[in-house]
Amino acid sequence: MKKRVGFPNALLFYKFSILWTTFFQELGAEIVISPKTNKIIKDLGVKFAPDEDCYSTKLYFGHTLYLKDKVDFLFIPRIGSDHEVNVGCPKFIALAEVLKSMFPDLPKIIMPFFSMAKKNHGRFKILRIIFSIGFRFTLNPFRILIAGKRAFDAQSKYDEELKFSEEELHKWENSKIFLQNLSIQEQRKTPLRIALVGHPYVINDDFSSVNIKNLLLSRGIDIITPDQMPKALIENQMEKLDYNMYFNYAREILGTTMHFIENNSIDGILQLIIFSCGPDSLIGEMSARYSSRKPGTPLLQLVLDELSSETGVLTRIEAFLDMIERKNEFRRNEENCHLHSLILDH
Ligand code: SF4
């Protein structure tokens, strides 16, 4: 019988799901992924997670507890960083141990530790992790090696397809090309472009983001997210700071915000901030200051937690979109007046 491996459908699973699931599938394991966040999962998380944890971590608790009696193993890797210098969130490292100590009846947790920022965590370390996990499922070292290679290849292909090159991004900014191919866009007189910035596990989790991404798409709005931004462009933006922003995923969010504020090439920025997230409070404040210095592109910041309601958020987004449309209308009228006066002058 196949061994069942459970994956809490939250936090870094949104970033590395292809890598992790491909690897275990290739090893012959049965993959069990918790469903998309729903009220049952949220209630479990809010009830059992420490009060001071951020909302996203609470949801991770809910997903893990949902899987508790359904799998033989849980896969909760302790990811220090996937960047050579900067770090992820300390929560990603601690979660597996915290869950194990709080809930001793959980299935066995596979919890490899990896941090690219550590000197000795290179290819050799990855091989060691691959084999130490692989031998739990097969005694065939070639199968383990092939599983590892296929998993990394699949993740690289996914990442490549997701990310823009700098050239593609500039082309999009300077054209009327749409990223989302929705027929509703054709019905809009003036299609809007919004950067939806935040963690991928918030933006893409309809429940914790109170469905904001779909709401924007249903309004025919073209959206771009930090995980689509070219890495080099983010790094260039971070060079402009007087200090090193050492939270790696916060760099992607802040870099995206800075780029669009600086270039004024889209209609607005919508930033999703998770309540009690340290990195989010930092970059939220920095984004607000950056935006107040260069106010051309409107920035709306929404703080989300377990009490956020779709209606409350919707009202603020509708007001934000109305304001952008009025601003664009005003700008168009001004341009027309200017053109008109130029014609009269001649
Ligand atoms: S980065 Fe923020 S939202 Fe994500 S796990 Fe850490 S504290 Fe929570």
Image (spheres, grey):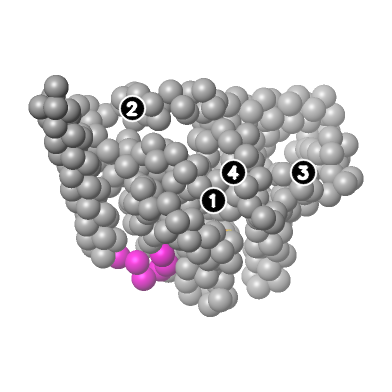
Q: Which mark is residue 84?
A: 3
Q: Quadrant of the N terminus?
A: top right
Mark 4 and mark 2 residues within 8 Å of each other at the beta carbon: no
The amino acid type, in three-letter code, at marker 2 is Phe
> Mark 1 sits on what residue?
254
Q: Type of residue at label 1?
A: Leu
Whole-angstrom CA distance, mark 3 to mark 4, is 17 Å
Say which of marks 2 and 1 sits in front. Answer: 1
Task: Please report the bounds of the magenta region as a residue range.
Answer: 303-309
Residue at x-position 78% and y-position 30%: 144
Q: Which of the marked residues, 2 or 1, is nearer the chain's N terminus?
A: 2
- The location of residue 287, given as percent across then percent down, is 49, 57
Rendered view: 102 above or below 251: below
Q: Residue at x 48, y 52 (%)?
A: 198
Label 1: few (<14), some (14–19) or many (≥20) C-alpha neighbours in 10 Å: many
Residue placed under numbered mark 2 in the picture:
178
The amino acid sitting under disc 3 is Glu
Label 4 vs label 2, nearer the camera? 4
N-terminal label among 3 and 4: 3
Q: Which residue is mark 4?
A: 237
For residue 53: magenta? Answer: no
Q: Is mark 2 in CB contact (under 8 Å) with mark 3?
A: no
